Image (spheres, grey):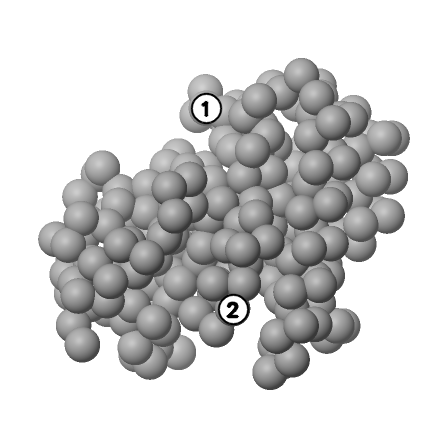
Amino acid sequence: MSISSNIEHLRSSLPSGVSLLAISKYQPIEALREAYDAGQRMFGENHIQEMAAKASVLPCDIEWHFTGHVQTNKIKYMAPFVSLIHAVDSFRLLREIDKHAAKHDRVIDCLLQIHIAQEDTKYGFTIDECRTMLATEPWRELRHVRITGLMAMGSNTDDMEQVRSEFRQMKVFFDELRSTHFADEPPFCQLSEGMTDDYPIAIEEGSTIVRIGSMIFGERQYK
Ligand SMILES: *Cc1c(COP(=O)(O)O)cnc(C)c1O
């Protein structure tokens, strides 16, 4: 299967209201170009410098999403152009992103990463930490970031009922925030979850952005 047919196949199977983010980390420029030529415009990368290097040579109508763990000393490299940062997991990070966005006179959209998986190596707020952050920190005062939803990774397991229950928990929390802290903020509407192995379940459980890498591009090309 080619990259373009993978994209076409995926796109035709996604319900309306669900966007396809092509995760292109460790893929060479030619692979991204092939996806672009098949109409793909949203790409996600996990390393800031790799994303900046790719953005500098590919067409400028691409939306670049950053899906990796954000190191504060590298925010400056993506602040001029990133469209959505998926994995914000502290108020401190939100404040740093705000500071860099201000220098470019931009408002950067961010998702709060929630830790729902069973592995303890993954980043993210627990649901309680996220509630506490939203209730106690002055995030509304940050003029150059906008919180537009939540992001999560399901457990890396064959137990799909486990993964489903995690995504279900996410949807409940997402709805809670939509009726409390974000009740007057319609832009808070994105739930980023679902990868190659679990995206159909994520969609059934309310995902609005699926992040798919290997199913589009095959094995990652380099590390
Ligand atoms: C690598 C990655 C993906 C894509 O994973 P695949 O299994 O290749 O689809 C999605 N989200 C994040 C955060 C990733 O790091």
Label 1: which secondary element: loop
Residue 191 appears anywhere in the view = yes
Question: Quadrant of residue 112 in the image?
Answer: top right
Indicate which disc residue 163 carries: none
Q: State the residue at coordinates (62%, 20%).
A: 185
Mark 2 to mark 1 CA distance (whole Å): 34 Å
> Residue 53 or 151: which is nearer the viewer?
151
Label 1 CB less than 8 angstroms from ligand 1: no
Residue 88 location, x and y as percent?
Answer: 63, 46
Q: Nearer the viewer, mark 2 or mark 1?
A: 2
Does residue 220 sit above or below 139 in this rendering? below
Rendered position, 149 above or below 15: above
**First in residue order: circle 2 vs circle 1:** 1
The quadrant of the image that shows the N terminus is bottom left
In the rendered image of this protein, does residue 204 appear above or below residue 59?
below
x and y percent of residue 97 in the render? 58, 36
Circle 2 sits in a helix, a strand or a loop, which is it? loop
Judged left or right of residue 182, residue 156 is left
Neighbourhood count class around disc 2 (C-alpha, 10 Å): few under 14, some 14–19, many 20 upward: many
* Residue 122 visible (yes or no): no
Q: Position of residue 20 (x, y in %)?
A: 36, 51
Disc 2 residue type (three-letter): Asp
At 30% from the left and 77% from the top, the residue drawn is 218
* Closest to the observer, 140 or 203: 203
Q: Residue at x 12, y 53 (%)?
A: 37
Amino acid type, residue under disc 1 in the picture: Arg
Q: Nearer the viewer, residue 125 or 117?
A: 117
Provide the residue designation for mark 1. 106
Are the residues at dot 2 and dot 1 in contact (C-beta closer than 8 Å)? no
